[in-house]
């Protein structure tokens, strides 16, 4: 079985920024499959996986569904795909365990749900959505997240989620040193629905060989995930510590709302210039203009709206 193991650890320097912007669309879903350096031979499969996920989200929107449900539908497809570092195929922490982070945010009422350091459950984004719907705490972590998930009827998944390459990948990261343990392959989605609401969802295993208890940017609102109908929606991937220090997802939607259509490029340039860090971000504006930027070699993506679909790395 293939897995995110084929993705090399972090490259040394930011690449030239790639920025793409798509025309405004009544409804649109844009997904990413992680910023990193996917080898040439795997790029088509990563792009195809992202397009499949974007279609799953677009189907929800075509049927008149909510942006919130579209981003979850898209992320579930990627969590189930062992190519990506989320759900099945996620990377392992220093103890050899899965420790999963996920978040979902609804731009209409600023409702949000997130889980951090969740053990093996097939679809962390479903649990994050349940946290959102419950309307209480926004972020549940570790044992608390596990207990909550079980109480809500989610079945623990066990070792079936660990792909054949995840353990050698961990061993490789250990020999290289813990600071080099970035797997890439985080997944995320942003969407705008026909009613003008936006949403974002992100899910990840984090970094290979990460410290036990380490939480990345993914479940931290404003860092890895954000949505506000008045501003836009964002889902990030890359060096989580840097995204948290810069609160990059919130900065990005603030820049969009200030009329800066190339906000994605702007914040990724800042990520590289201020901290020398690597990553990528997806945005959708309140008017349905999807865009993304990355300063890594690749960030697989797929975007689907009425009458158009694009994917790539
Ligand atoms: N941002 C994720 C984290 O730091 C990793 C990634 O996107 O590759 O946990």
Image: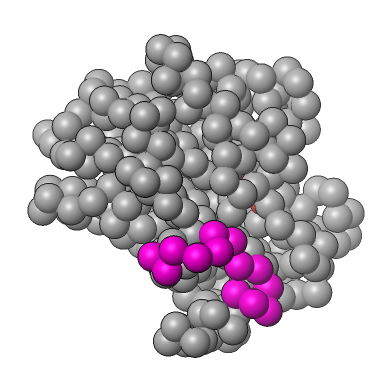
Counting from the top left corner in percent of width and height, residue 161 is at 54, 77
Which residue is found at the position 63% from the left and 18% from the top? Answer: 269
Image point (52%, 44%), residue name: 225
Q: Quadrant of the C terminus?
A: top left
Res 162 → quadrant = bottom right
Q: Which of 249 and 90 is in front in this view?
A: 249
Residue 93 position, x and y percent, is 75, 67
The span shown in magenta is 133-145
Q: Does the magenta stretch include residue 109?
A: no
Q: Is residue 205 above or below residue 228?
A: below
Classify residue 268 by image quadrant: top right
| Camera sees residue 177 | yes
Q: Is residue 239 left or right of residue 109?
A: right
Q: Where is residue 214 in the image (x, y as percent from the top left)?
A: 76, 60
Kindly tell me whether residue 301 is visible in this rendering. Answer: no
How are the colours assigned in the image? Answer: one colour
Please give the name of the residue rendered at 50% of the width and 23% of the height, measured from the top-left corner.
Answer: 254
Question: Which of 243 and 49 lies nearest the eye of the viewer?
Answer: 243
Answer with left or right where residue 88 lies relative to residue 242. left
In the displayed structure image, the side of residue 254 where residue 304 appears, left or right: left
Q: Is residue 129 above or below residue 305?
A: below
Residue 236 image point, x, y percent: 54, 40
């Amino acid at each position: 079985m293939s897995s995110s193991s084929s993705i090399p650890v972090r490259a040394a320097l930011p690449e030239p920024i790639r920025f793409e912007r798509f025309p405004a669309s009544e409804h649109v879903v844009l997904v990413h499959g992680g910023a990193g350096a996917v080898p040439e031979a795997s790029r088509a499969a990563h792009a195809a996986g992202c397009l499949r996920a974007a279609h799953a989200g677009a189907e929800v929107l075509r049927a008149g569904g909510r942006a919130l449900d579209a981003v979850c539908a898209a992320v579930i497809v990627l969590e189930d795909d062992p190519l990506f570092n989320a759900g099945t195929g996620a990377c392992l922490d220093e103890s050899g365990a899965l420790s999963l982070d996920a978040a979902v945010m609804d731009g209409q009422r600023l409702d949000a749900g997130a889980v951090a350091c969740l053990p093996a459950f097939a679809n962390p984004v479903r649990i994050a959505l349940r946290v959102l719907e419950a309307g209480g705490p926004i972020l549940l972590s570790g044992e608390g997240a596990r207990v909550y998930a079980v109480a809500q009827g989610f079945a623990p998944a066990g070792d079936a989620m660990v792909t054949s390459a995840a353990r050698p990948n961990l061993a490789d990261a250990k020999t290289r040193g813990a600071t080099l343990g970035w797997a890439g392959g985080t997944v995320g989605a942003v969407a705008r629905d026909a009613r003008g609401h936006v949403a974002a969802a992100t899910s990840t295993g984090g970094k290979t060989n990460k410290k036990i208890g380490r939480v990345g940017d993914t479940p931290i609102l404003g860092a890895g995930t954000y949505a506000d109908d008045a501003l836009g929606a964002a889902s990030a991937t890359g060096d989580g510590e840097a995204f948290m220090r810069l609160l990059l997802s919130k900065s990005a939607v603030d820049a969009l709302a200030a009329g800066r259509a190339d906000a994605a490029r702007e914040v990724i340039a800042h990520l590289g210039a201020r901290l020398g860090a690597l990553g990528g971000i997806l945005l959708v504006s309140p008017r349905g203009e999807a865009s993304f930027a990355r300063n890594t070699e690749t960030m697989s993506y797929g975007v689907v709206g009425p009458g158009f679909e694009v994917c790539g790395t």
